[in-house]
Image (spheres, rainbow, N blue to C red):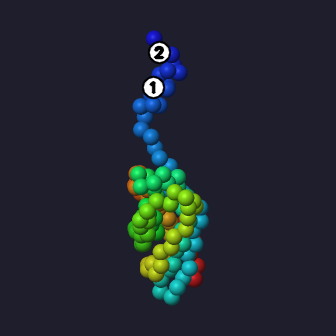
Amino acid sequence: MKTTAHLIAALLAAAPAFAEAPKVTNAVAKSTGMGWNFSVTLEHPDTGWEHYADGWEIVDATGKVLGTRILHHPHVNEQPFTRSLNNVMLPDGTREVFVRVKCNEDGWKDSGYKISLSR
């Protein structure tokens, strides 16, 4: 008869592994005439082509995508790293946006990172 510890260990071993989502450590927005420039700093335990942060999006409070930055390669030895997205057009009256993140293994996740906008 298996002990409780053995049962727990067996259940944990059978559970799917959940990889860590990319984490936004900083994000800034600058108004540039009609559009906005965004710089987003991400941290993710990239392991190579099999698992890496491969994008981020600027979304409004309803989840509507306003701009997307695709990351085309892993950043194993460059953590955290910053990438920009320029000339993003936002609807009039937008006062805040959010950063959504993606890794090639787990897909899109809400990072919870809010950017307050001011001109």
Q: Which mark is residue 65?
A: none
Question: In the rendering, at what x and y percent does residue 3 appear?
Answer: 51, 16
Q: Which mark is residue 10?
A: 1
As helix, strand or loop, the secondary structure at mark 1 comes to helix
Looking at the picture, which amino acid does disc 2 mark? Answer: Lys
Question: Badge 1, how many Cα within 10 Å: few under 14, some, many 20+?
Answer: few
Question: In the rendering, at what x and y percent does residue 66 appear?
Answer: 42, 72
Q: Quadrant of residue 118?
A: bottom right
Left or right: 116 as drawn, with respect to 59: right
Foreground: 47 or 44? 47
Question: Badge 2, how many Cα within 10 Å: few under 14, some, many 20+?
Answer: few
Q: How many marks?
A: 2
Q: Which mark is residue 2?
A: 2
Quick one: quadrant of the C terminus? bottom right
Q: CA distance from mark 2 to mark 1?
A: 10 Å
| Image position of 89 with respect to 69: above or below | below
Q: Earlier in the sequence, mark 2 or mark 1?
A: 2
From this viewpoint, which residue is outermost toward the bottom?
A: 33
* Discs 2, 1 touching: Cβ within 8 Å: yes
Q: Residue at x 54, y 72 (%)?
A: 39
Foreground: 111 or 47? 47
Left or right: 68 as drawn, with respect to 44: left
As helix, strand or loop, the secondary structure at mark 2 comes to loop
Q: Is residue 96 visible?
A: no
Q: Is residue 31 visible?
A: yes
Q: Quadrant of residue 80?
A: bottom right
Question: In the rendering, at what x and y percent does residue 31 appear?
Answer: 54, 82
Q: Residue at x 45, y 31 (%)?
A: 13
Quick one: quadrant of the N terminus? top left
